[in-house]
Image (cartoon, rainbow, N blue to C red):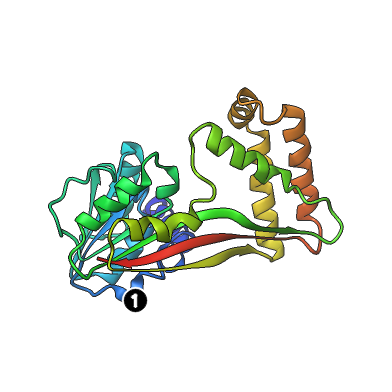
Amino acid sequence: MRGHAQARSQLEAAIKARGADVYAGFLLPYLRSDMTVLDCGCGEATITLGLAVAVLDGWIVGVDLDRDRLMAAGRSTAAMGRSNVACVVAGGGRLPFHDAAFDAVLCHSVLETLDDPAGVVTELRRVTKPGGPVGAASVDYGGIILASEHAVTPVRFYDIRQQLWRAAGIAEPKMGRRLRGLFQAAGFARVDAFADYISYGTPERVRAFALDRAAECRDREWQALVTRHKIASVEELLSLAEAWEAWSDDPGAFFAFAWCRVLAWR
């Protein structure tokens, strides 16, 4: 019983950190309790479970290609006692649903990872009911803010990450700025675009963020990938890890990056 309570507490903390209020707040005002909603690229369903609260008399369907993450999503759904959530193995390029199946759709942190984002946006439009909203969000590293009072800012880290994402086909680091054009081209009736910054400006958030980046620089698999693509040496990555740690102790350390979002109506 104690282990179950601890697991639920950890899950609730994860949902609070990466939940619908934080990452899908721009779509929530357009949801009604009886809607059927698609979460395309739901992962482990931390956002999905928050959406489920907004449509208690409806349904949330989460789709993802990663079976392991979907299994984790199923466990989380059961742990939280959500009976209005279903998880389906599927990709956004060929959704296994009939036309106009959903009242609303969310697609968060997905389009930047795809070879054919335009095709997926077309699919999202197909499965959305006429007049229904589709919300999408993608990162854009073009507006990074990395500052400090005294320490050297490890800005080179993001140059390496962007090069690696493109070289290894991981993601497009500046997808955010393309969202409005993609949805306009897919034939949506109206597309509104905007951006919000995710900020790290307290001692706790700065340190946690910096230590995560330092750990990334020391990760053997990440080092191997970076060196394989001849983007940076292991020595430079280790130096960057130390720079992140020094930056975290700087009283003026501050980091922020942009999440670009669109709301589109079919």
Q: Is residue 62 above or below residue 232?
A: below
Quick one: quadrant of the C terminus? bottom left
Does residue 26 appear in the picture of this structure?
yes
> What residue do we see at 75% from left, 40% from top?
240
Q: Give x and y (percent) for residue 48.
A: 33, 58
Q: Give x and y (percent) for residue 178.
A: 46, 55
Q: Give x and y (percent) for residue 218.
A: 68, 34
Does residue 78 appear in the picture of this structure?
no
Residue that sits furthest to the right in the current view: 150
Q: Give x and y (percent) for residue 215.
A: 66, 40
> What residue do we see at 40% from left, 49% from top?
111
**Nearer to us in this view, 139 or 255:** 139
> What residue do we see at 40% from left, 64% from top?
262
Secondary element at image label 1: helix
Instruction: Please identify the quarter of the rendering in which residue 80 is found.
Output: bottom left
Q: How many circles with numbers are drawn on the protein?
A: 1
**Nearer to us in this view, 162 or 80:** 162
Residue that sits furthest to the top in the current view: 228
Q: Is residue 116 above or below residue 38?
A: above
In this rendering, would 146 be left or right of 171?
A: right
In this rendering, would 161 be left or right of 116?
A: right
Instruction: Please identify the quarter of the rendering in which residue 157 is found.
Output: top right
Instruction: Please identify the quarter of the rendering in which residue 6 is found.
Output: bottom left
**Nearer to us in this view, 208 or 89:** 89
Question: Which class describes the residues within 10 Å of circle 1: few (<14), some (14-19), or many (20+)?
Answer: few
Q: Is residue 56 above or below residue 184?
A: below
Amino acid type, label 1: Pro
Q: Which residue is mark 1?
A: 29
**Nearer to us in this view, 29 or 21:** 29
